Image (cartoon, rainbow, N blue to C red):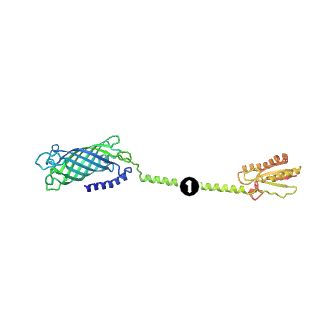
Amino acid sequence: MKKIISIFAFALVAMSASAENLYKESKFFDNWYVGIQGGVASPAVGHAFWKDARGAFGVNVGKQLTPVYGLELEYTGVINTACSGNGATWASLPGGGYAIDYTVLTLNSTVNLMNLFGGYKGQPRLFEIQAVAGTGWGHSFLPGPNNDANDVVFKFGANFNFNIGKEKAWTVAFKPAILYDFVNRELAMTARAAQIQLFAGVTYHFKNSNGTHSFAFGRGYDQAEVDRLNATINETRGMVADRDQTIAAKNQRIADLEAALKACEAKPAVVQTVTNTKDNLECYVYFNQGKSNISAAQQPNVERIATFLKNHAGSKVVIKGYASPEGSVEVNERIARQRAEAVKTMLVNKYKIAADRIQAEGQGVGNSFSEPDWNRVSICTIQE
């Protein structure tokens, strides 16, 4: 018996591992069941079935390895109801003092024919047929020579199952089967060599980790689909890498422009005084890039022009505004004109110089100096 149990446990582990590869949601402790059964057993050789039939019962525990294949350990016993008689058969020998005078322990394999040929639909069908085959150990408790013996038993049968309930947790079954005994005695074929069983039983299927009492489908992927997904992922990663490089380059460009702007703004204001002749006095007012307002550093040059105009009542000033080459033509012309007007406005508003003594003109891009930054200027020429 210990050998049978060991074989049963080993087979469960090995076949269950294989089933795990097919049904990822099925674990070792899933799809177990336990059942009880009762009915009659009768000799298969030389006897009338119903006349010599005796009461029998059984219990079984098993595991469904896949929706098609399963293994179970089954124990059955025949009740001692022997009648009087002279024949040496297991149906007619006097009782040996035991309530049960014949037991069988078998390891059975089951095949669900409906799922084998019709496919598994995601849950058990209302009606299913299972083929059953197994081998095991039988023992007779009958008195007399060669009757208290151990036998090798082979079982063949079928289960006609009705799966009931919303979750199909219960199965009611009709179970016909035939058992063959290989007995160790001189008479190779006796009435005890084969027995027919007619059982009816109830089985309960334990709840699984997937929340049901049966197998659940998992989503499968073929290799082609996996390859397509991997290709899409790699393509997306490449696009992200290219985008990151583009963003990094633009960020670097922005940083360089900001640094150049700060460096330009940090340059000290240029104050230039040109030595003029009496008939051609000039003064220069410089501007920052893109600006037309007069900075505090350049106001002394405007004040110098105002002082001269106040001291020489007959003099006038011509102001010509210029821009550096950056920017469009329209922008340069506008900002050049605004720079000339800015000097005129300060002379009029702050230093009270008459507007008719001042002529302001925009000259566009200047080329008076080789240094482009110096061409952001208003050149003020005094006329006497």
Q: Residues within 10 Å of mark 1 (few under 14, many from 20)?
A: few
Q: Quadrant of the N terminus?
A: bottom left
Q: Residue 15's spot in the image, x, y percent?
A: 32, 54
Horizontal arrangement in the rendering, residue 116 relative to residue 154 (left or right): right
- Which of the two residues, 377 or 71, is positioned nearer the viewer here? 71
Q: Residue at x 36, y 52 (%)?
A: 20
Looking at the rendered structure, the kind of residue marked 1 is Asp
Q: Residue 48's spot in the image, x, y percent?
A: 15, 44
Mark 1, residue position: 242
- Which of the two residues, 127 or 26, is positioned nearer the viewer here? 26
Task: Name the residue at the left extreme.
Answer: 86
Horizontal arrangement in the rendering, residue 14 relative to residue 57 (left or right): right
Horizontal arrangement in the rendering, residue 223 relative to residue 125 (left or right): right
Q: Residue at x 43, y 53 (%)?
A: 224
Q: Residue 318's spot in the image, x, y percent?
A: 83, 51
Horizontal arrangement in the rendering, residue 283 relative to residue 52 (left or right): right
- Which of the two residues, 333 or 59, is positioned nearer the viewer here? 59
Q: Residue at x 64, y 55 (%)?
A: 255
Q: Secondary structure at mark 1?
A: helix
